[in-house]
Image: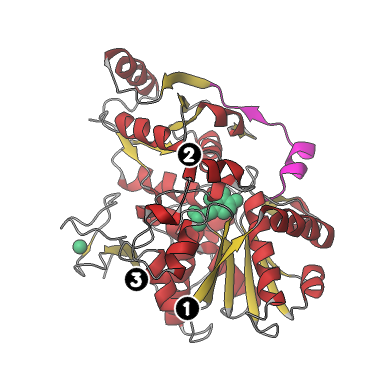
Amino acid sequence: MREKYLLRCPGCGRSFPDRYTLNCPSGCDTLLRTVYAERRLTPRSLPGIFRYKDWLPIEGHLRVDAGPVSYESEHLARELGLLHLTITFSGYWPERGAGMETCSFKELEAQPTALRLREKGAGGVIQVSSAGNTGRAFCQVSGLTGAPVVVVVPTAAAGRLWTTVPAENVCLITVDGDYSDSIAFGREVCSLPGIVPEGGAKNVARRDGMGTVMLDGTLSAGRLPDYYFQAVGSGTGGIAAWEAAERLVADGRFGPRLPELHLSQNLPFVPMVRAWEAGRRTIVAEDMPDAEAAIARVYADVLTNCHPPWGIRGGVRDAFLASGGRMYAVANEDARGAGRIFAETEEIDLDPAAAVAVASLARAMEEGLIDPGKHILLNVTGGGYQRVAEDLDRYPVDPFLRVAAGTTLDGDLRDDIEAWLAEQEVAAYA
Ligand SMILES: *Cc1c(COP(=O)(O)O)cnc(C)c1O
Ligand SMILES: [Zn+2]
């Protein structure tokens, strides 16, 4: 293999070069995987996640110093009675060298995705539908690199879109409706020539970007963890952890066994917990009763995804089957309490989703579900909002268009977005 990497379909087994490919060319319904020529992980002297460039589907790097930061916990570990707790933190925490200024691990996805598109995507502009953290991360990367992006969010979530550098190449469209309505309008926008979807879990750059948490935590501890804890909405981070762990096992220096996956969701919206407990390959309506009302009641709403890549080949269920582990349903008050304990012991504020993961770890200890002497990697997927508010200027991203739910891309809207594209000097591409 002369290329740095190839894509491989776990369905038909075909391998092929990457052309910003999101789906198997033979039409298999799978998550494609990257296969890297380099089997040993050699950290590079590059900023942020580009330290792990060998195992990212990119050729160059961005001058962005924002990556995961790992350390061995003393205070939370003592509080919970654990002997070997590695915390991998993605967010803003200058004392620990953590510089993800939009405060969530979605920046791990946005950086390689933007770069992969520039390198392999023939000049297309990326489109992202988001309820908050993902959109903010892509706006930030756009602000840092100048790469244009089209972000579609529910109008009610527009306030979550801010950056810490001016982001002048963002086309923000707000939809009067929920996240699903934003996804639907995002799909409309992608019918325009020159605009391409980011692809969610199907995008190998997003998964391998998130996989740097496992790489960083493992290098920090000098070995693969026995247990990996994370709160999940789509579960993409869980898949990424499994894929990265497989690479580390193949590397040979970090231990022979895949870590167990301990993934958590926030009650009352816990579709993957239910599908796992029922042994179902697909998520069905009874896994999310009263979905709308349930979503409105959770503390960590970034964890509410109605269509996670659960049963798809290479998805969350396959990750569980390969790694073992369990799922946790965490109540709001337990998550809030865990967030407070984390802030007291480790001295940084958490994203609500990260607090759900901490609560699941506390529960695992209380109920004797894990061996307290084994090695744990806790993926703290977001935090430091209070620190950012104290330290940095935040620029709100202004909406370019506002549309009603169910809107199709009629002549005027099409003209507006094409005019924006032309301004980005990429409209020549078609
Ligand atoms: C998106 C998000 C999650 C869930 O990640 P997935 O692996 O995609 O399910 C957890 N925590 C935070 C802070 C997030 O933004
Ligand atoms: Zn295939």
Q: Amino acid at mark 2?
A: Ser
Residue lying at 28% horizontally and 17% vertically, measured from the top left? 410
Asked if 82 appears above or below 379 in the picture, the reply is: below
Instruction: Judge from the rendering whether residue 297 lies leftward or rightward of residue 25; answer left or right.
Output: right
Q: Amino acid at mark 1?
A: Gly
How far apart in space, not on screen, are marks 2 and 1 (Cα)? 30 Å
Say what secondary structure mark 2 lies in. Answer: loop
Say what secondary structure mark 1 lies in. Answer: loop
Which disc, if any, is residue 1? Answer: none
Residue numbers of the magenta segment? 383-398
Toward which corner of the image does residue 397 lie, by quadrant?
top right
- Say whether marks 2 and 3 touch (CB < 8 Å): no
Quadrant placement of the N terminus: bottom left
Across and down, in percent, residue 11 comes to: 23, 67
Residue lying at 52% horizontally and 78% vertically, measured from the top left? 259
**Mark 2 — residue?**
130
Residue lying at 47% horizontally and 57% vertically, measured from the top left? 271
**Of pointers 2 and 3, the one earlier in the residue sequence:** 3
- Say whether marks 2 and 1 touch (CB < 8 Å): no
Query: Is residue 391 highlighted in magenta?
Result: yes
How far apart in space, not on screen, are marks 2 and 3 (Cα)? 33 Å
Instruction: Judge from the rendering whether residue 294 lies leftward or rightward of residue 355; answer left or right.
Output: left
- Neighbor class of circle 1 (other Cα within 10 Å; few <14, some 14-19, many 20+) is some
Toward which corner of the image does residue 215 lie, by quadrant?
bottom right
Query: Is residue 227 highlighted in magenta?
Result: no
- Neighbor class of circle 3 (other Cα within 10 Å; few <14, some 14-19, many 20+) is some
**Mark 3 — residue?**
37
**Mark 1 — residue?**
324
